[in-house]
């Protein structure tokens, strides 16, 4: 039987950041992930950093080193942990269900498309909040990344047969139509690839997420961290705050607006 002080459930950017910050504090930590690290939302998003976030009290310090040892293979064993931190993204509700608990988290299948390289046209991240949402940017190599448009990817009915969200032709057409409506110069630009991934939503007015200890678990020390729409950007700072909560019982920044108690009260 394996044992650890803190067990991290989820190996995305947020889970890895939390584990890193705990390890830097000398905490014995074990991270478990059903697949490869950063394979789900962390690896399926377009890599956009939303530095214009209007939450002034969040400041990110990005992590550049790693102190993890990775164990691969069929990980079927019992793990004894003093504290558990659930950072499972869109699968958080399923993991919380193992404790008989629930949270208001909505999974959202996101679809991303990439064009052939073009001459420089768009210098900034463009977000369109019309009838269909769109996130669009041009990379340094000249390709355009078209994110969403309100038309999602497809989640297989039987998630046991495939953990990957599928791209749909209908969404490709609809997303491209939104992008062309916003930037007409894209009308003749070919697409070269597309992919889909499962992200999570924590509410229309909460793009940060939820963080805190779930006291409904009673004597069990259970912490939950769920990133909202800005998860890829905020994961380093959310991971640091989660580590502070686990070790010190409080965070260095005001997290009350994003507390787990508020999330539970909305259910």
Image (spheres, rainbow, N blue to C red):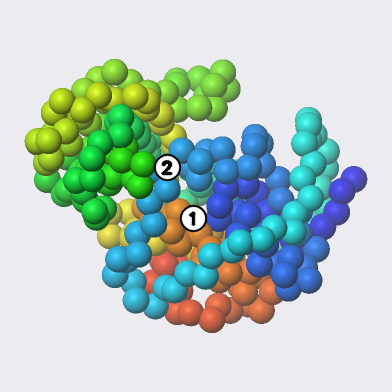
Reply above or below: 193 against 80. above
Q: Is residue 50 left or right of residue 181?
A: right
Residue at left 45%, top 20%? 157
Q: Which residue is mark 1?
A: 226
Residue at left 70%, top 67%? 22
Residue at left 57%, top 43%? 38
Q: Is residue 120 left or right of residue 195?
A: left
- Looking at the figure, which quarter contains the C terminus? bottom left
- Looking at the figure, which quarter contains the N terminus? top right
Image coordinates of residue 176 in percent, x first then y, are: 20, 29
Q: Nearer the viewer, residue 175 or 117?
A: 117
Q: Residues within 10 Å of mark 1 (few under 14, many from 20)?
A: many
* Extreme residue in the right direction: 1
Q: Residues within 10 Å of mark 2 (few under 14, many from 20)?
A: some
Image coordinates of residue 63 in percent, x first then y, are: 59, 63
Q: Residue 45, labelled with which disc?
A: 2
Residue at left 64%, top 37%? 36
The quarter of the picture where residue 68 lies is bottom right
Q: Secondary structure at mark 1?
A: strand
Q: Nearer the viewer, mark 2 or mark 1?
A: 2
* Extreme residue in the front direction: 119
Q: Is any atom of residue 147 visible in this view?
A: no
Q: Is any atom of residue 120 visible in this view?
A: yes
């Amino acid at each position: 039987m394996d044992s650890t002080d803190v067990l991290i459930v989820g190996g995305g950017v947020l889970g890895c950041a939390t584990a890193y910050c705990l390890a830097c504090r000398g905490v014995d930590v074990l991270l478990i992930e059903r697949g490869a690290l950063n394979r789900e939302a962390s690896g399926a998003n377009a890599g956009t950093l939303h530095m214009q976030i209007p939450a002034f009290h969040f400041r990110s310090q990005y992590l550049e080193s790693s102190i993890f040892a990775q164990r691969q293979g069929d990980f079927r064993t019992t793990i004894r942990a003093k504290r558990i931190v659930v950072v499972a993204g869109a699968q958080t509700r399923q993991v919380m269900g193992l404790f008989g608990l629930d949270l208001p988290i909505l999974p959202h299948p996101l679809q991303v498309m990439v064009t052939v390289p073009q001459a420089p046209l768009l210098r900034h991240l463009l977000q369109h909040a019309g009838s269909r949402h769109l996130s669009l940017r041009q990379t340094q190599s000249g390709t355009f990344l078209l994110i969403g448009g309100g038309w999602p990817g497809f989640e297989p009915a039987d998630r046991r047969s495939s953990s990957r969200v599928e791209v749909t032709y209908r969404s490709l057409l609809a997303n491209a139509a939104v992008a062309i409506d916003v930037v007409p110069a894209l009308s003749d630009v070919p697409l070269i690839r597309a992919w889909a991934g499962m992200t999570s939503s924590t509410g229309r007015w909460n793009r940060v997420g939820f963080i805190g200890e779930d006291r409904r678990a009673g004597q069990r020390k259970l912490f939950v961290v769920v990133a909202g729409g800005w998860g890829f950007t905020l994961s380093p700072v959310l991971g640091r705050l989660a580590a502070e909560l686990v070790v010190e019982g409080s965070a260095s920044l005001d997290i009350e607006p994003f507390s787990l108690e508020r999330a539970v009260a909305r259910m």
